[in-house]
């Protein structure tokens, strides 16, 4: 019997890595505003940033969180958002005398994810992309529709590039002893509802299905049969480029997009990124080779990866899905994750058979706890 450990962004966060969408957007806004401080006007493919008062010096620090640095005011009936930075008096009290920097966003998708999605997860940003694509394709004017799709694809390309630059700049992650134990854990008899095994087993083969772009998993090597599949790419591998897009090709919305004649409408659907490497083929070979248990470490199991997760969860070789939850026994994300996982099952009997109950689940270790 084999094991697949699915690793998501929560795994990096648990290791002290600043890889959340919030961390990324804070860093990016600070960076473009610093450039506008010097150049007065800074422009790239995503936005134009303009300093409105030449005599203002904003105190933009690398460690400053975005909600402290900016008060966001969106004027009605305009195509720009004004970010107003607060002034801190020596006494420590906050003075909201406005010192504005104006940011003109190049399209509505970029404006939305920068002004309304500060608390979102990466899966939410991927979902926002898909929602924006659906809205664009409803435009009756084919020419306008093509232009908007081109602009959306350009935005996704720039975001992916900026994300790779940001992640590459982060400090290396730490080692956490608790994850060594989790990754070396046997397949437990109690975690499988069906009478398949009579004793705890060492996995014959252990595949790490890594949805992260980082190499945090490098700290751990759980035996000779332990292999990692960087299914969404890796920042240090030019032969395995980053995949950032949407992966639900099961829903009815996807069929309508597939029937579109607009060029580029499918550019950021994940399948077409998977075709660039052998990672997906290798995954199919693994799940077809033997029965297996799945461990989930820090993955949201959202609809953005629905096609792949459906293949993994409903496959007849899958016999158990064990969730490692974030939080405490009283307050955690276990229930939320089971609901997300259920969306990937058509056969709900299989869902009930395979989810390991909460009282047999384990909390994810955290770098600061």
Image (cartoon, grey):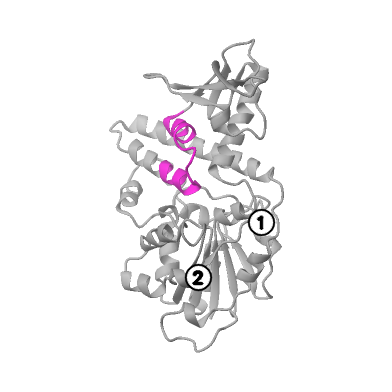
Label 2 SS: strand
Give the quarter of the figure containing the C terminus: bottom right
Give the percent coordinates (x, y) of residue 65: 59, 34
Magenta-span inclusion, residue 113: yes
Give the percent coordinates (x, y) of residue 86: 57, 21
Q: What's the residue at 37%, 19% (across, down)?
A: 76
Can you say whether 88 is above or below 168 in the image?
above
Q: Residue furthest left?
A: 140
Label 1 SS: loop
Q: How many marks?
A: 2
Q: Which residue is mark 2?
A: 294
Q: What's the residue at 30%, 33% (across, down)?
A: 139
Q: Residue 215: which disc?
A: 1
Q: Nearer the viewer, residue 86 or 36?
A: 86
Can you say whether 201 is above or below 314 in the image?
below
Mark 1 crowd level (few <14, some 14–19, many ≥20, 10 Å Cα): some
Can you say whether 290 is above or below 275 in the image?
below
Q: Read off the magenta span.
A: 107-129
Give the percent coordinates (x, y) of residue 137: 33, 38
Give the percent coordinates (x, y) of residue 331: 46, 56
* Rendering quarter of residue 143: top left
Q: Nearer the viewer, residue 190 or 122?
A: 190
Which callout, 2 or 1, points at the residue further toward the start of the chain? 1
Q: Is residue 265 visible?
A: no
Q: Nearer the viewer, residue 340 or 251?
A: 340
Q: Residue furthest bottom?
A: 198
Our reading of the magenta stretch's main secondary structure is: helix
Q: How far apart in space, not on screen, are marks 2 and 1 (Cα)?
A: 20 Å
Magenta-span inclusion, residue 108: yes
Q: What's the residue at 56%, 32% (across, down)?
A: 66
Image marks 2 and 1: residues in contact by CB distance under 8 Å: no
């Amino acid at each position: 019997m084999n094991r697949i450990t699915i690793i998501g962004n929560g795994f990096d966060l648990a290791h002290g890595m600043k890889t959340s969408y919030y961390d990324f957007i804070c860093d990016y806004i600070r960076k473009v505003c610093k450039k506008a401080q010097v150049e007065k006007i800074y422009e790239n493919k995503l936005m134009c940033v303009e300093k409105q008062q030449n005599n203002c010096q904003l105190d933009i620090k690398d460690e400053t969180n975005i909600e402290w640095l900016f008060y966001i005011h969106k004027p009605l009936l305009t195509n720009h958002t004004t970010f107003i930075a607060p002034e801190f008096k020596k006494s420590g009290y906050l003075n909201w005398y406005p010192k504005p920097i104006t940011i003109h966003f190049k399209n509505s998708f970029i404006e939305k994810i920068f002004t309304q999605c500060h608390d979102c997860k990466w899966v939410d940003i991927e979902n926002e992309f898909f929602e924006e694509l659906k809205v664009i394709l409803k435009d009756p004017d084919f020419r306008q529709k093509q232009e908007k799709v081109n602009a959306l694809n350009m935005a996704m390309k720039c975001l992916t590039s900026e994300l790779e630059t940001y992640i590459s700049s982060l400090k290396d992650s730490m080692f956490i002893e608790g994850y060594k134990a989790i990754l070396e854990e046997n397949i437990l008899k109690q975690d499988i509802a069906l009478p398949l095994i009579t004793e705890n087993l060492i996995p014959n083969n252990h595949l790490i299905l890594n949805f992260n772009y980082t190499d945090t998993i490098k700290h751990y090597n759980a035996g000779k049969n332990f292999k990692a599949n960087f299914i969404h790419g890796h920042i240090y591998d030019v032969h395995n480029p980053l995949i950032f897009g949407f992966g639900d090709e099961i829903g009815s919305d996807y069929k309508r997009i597939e029937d579109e004649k607009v060029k580029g409408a499918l550019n950021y659907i994940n399948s077409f990124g998977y075709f660039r490497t052998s990672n997906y083929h290798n995954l199919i070979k693994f799940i077809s080779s033997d029965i297996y248990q799945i461990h989930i470490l820090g993955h949201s199991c959202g609809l953005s990866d629905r096609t792949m997760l459906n293949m993994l969860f409903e496959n007849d070789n899958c016999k158990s899905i064990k969730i490692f939850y974030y939080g405490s026994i009283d307050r955690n994300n276990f229930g939320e994750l089971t609901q997300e996982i259920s969306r990937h099952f058509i056969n709900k009997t299989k869902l009930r058979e395979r989810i390991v109950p909460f009282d047999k689940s384990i909390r994810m270790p955290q770098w600061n706890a």
